[in-house]
Image (cartoon, rainbow, N blue to C red):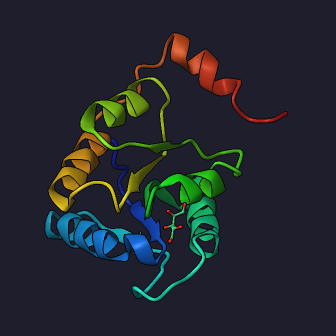
Amino acid sequence: MSILQPGKKVALCSDHAGYELKRTIIEYLNGRGIATEDFGTDSADSCDYPDFAHPCALAVENGSDYPGIAMCGTGNGIAMTLNKHQGIRAALCWDTDLARLAREHNNANVLVLPARFIPADKALEIVDTFLNTEFEGGRHERRIEKIPVK
Ligand code: RB5
């Protein structure tokens, strides 16, 4: 089942290392009628991933967009930044099983991709899995409720 919500766009962000993959994903989603909001970066010129991760995280956190998809070279820097936001559960996924479990068990609201370590066709499979897997709830609900720092 799709996790897309009516009236909400998918939020995307990347640094220079993820720029090309982000363009590919936006084209893929828009071609399927899925609306996106791109928080940058806007070129392959060297830049700093937090400048784009924070605004993207805020949009998902405040509910104006859902879900998010983020990428940098390894995925680590952008995931670290996104996860500083209490309302964000960003999951670094390099295969479809990880994406499925990030949704089923962690209710991840941002998918993070390691752009320099996976081919584009694999990334699109991971995106499809993430966008079409629901949270299982139950015991996992209790666990994710304990994640934010109180
Ligand atoms: C950029 O060279 C690279 O450091 C960045 O994309 C990312 O991998 C950081 O975590």
Q: Residue at x 48, y 79 (%)?
A: 40
Residue farthest to the right, as pictured: 150
Vertical comparison of 144 with 126: above or below: above
- As rendered, which of 17 and 22 lies closer to the eye? 17
Q: Where, quadrant-wise, is the C terminus in this rendering? A: top right
Q: Quadrant of residue 92?
A: top left
Residue 134 on image: x %, y %: 34, 30
Asked whether the viewer can see residue 63, the reply is no
Q: Residue at x 35, y 61 (%)?
A: 115
Q: Residue at x 37, y 76 (%)?
A: 19
- Residue 122 is left or right of residue 55, and the answer is left
- All told, the count of numbered labels is 0
Residue 120 on image: x %, y %: 20, 61
Q: Where, quadrant-wise, is the N terminus in this rendering? A: top left
- As rendered, which of 92 and 11 lies closer to the eye? 92
- Residue 77 is left or right of residue 12, and the answer is right
Residue 146 on image: x %, y %: 71, 24
- Residue 121 is left or right of residue 75, and the answer is left
Residue 53 on image: x %, y %: 58, 66
Vertical comparison of 137 with 64: above or below: above
Q: Residue at x 43, y 66 (%)?
A: 12
- As rendered, which of 50 and 137 lies closer to the eye? 50
Asked whether the viewer can see residue 140, the reply is yes
